[in-house]
Amino acid sequence: MNNSKINTESKLRSIEEASDYLGIKNHAFKNAFYNIYNKQQPKAVRIGKRIYFTEKALNDFVKQNEVTEAK
């Protein structure tokens, strides 16, 4: 398999990489994942004790939580 042709949406990102990808602080992402969404969003992949996220899961998470009107 040619590594240069790996689909970027299926690339696994650590919690730190996921927070960088979303442009938010690491602690804000961890708080949202562990406390606010109770490990349900964004959809995670567990390998051993580590948790990873795909770009597709992160993009879906953002899309599901978009605010369409200001309050």
Image (tube, helix red, strand yellow):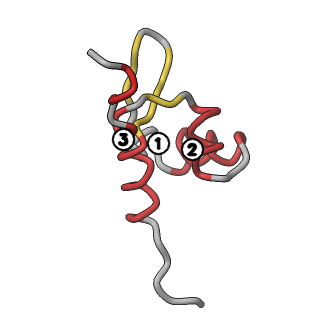
| Residue sitting nearer the eye, 11 or 6 | 6
Residue position for label 3:
9
Q: Residue 35 carries which label?
A: 2
The answer to which of marks 2 and 3 sits earlier in the sequence is: 3
Label 1: few (<14), some (14–19) or many (≥20) C-alpha neighbours in 10 Å: few
| Residue sitting nearer the eye, 2 or 54 | 2
Q: Which mark is residue 38?
A: 1
| Contact flag, marks 1 and 2 (Cβ < 8 Å) | yes
| Contact flag, marks 3 and 1 (Cβ < 8 Å) | no
Q: What residue type is labelled 2?
A: Asn
User: Which of the two marks, 2 or 3, is nearer to us in this view?
Assistant: 3
Q: What residue type is labelled 3?
A: Glu
* 11 displayed left or right of 69: left
Residue 50 in percent (x, y) is at: 50, 17
Residue 1 in percent (x, y) is at: 26, 15
User: Which of the two marks, 3 or 1, is nearer to us in this view?
Assistant: 3
The answer to which of marks 3 and 1 sits earlier in the sequence is: 3
**Label 3 – label 1 distance at C-alpha:** 23 Å
- SS at circle 2: helix
Farthest residue toward the left?
A: 1
Q: Which amino acid does label 1 sit on?
A: Asn
Residue 66 in percent (x, y) is at: 47, 72
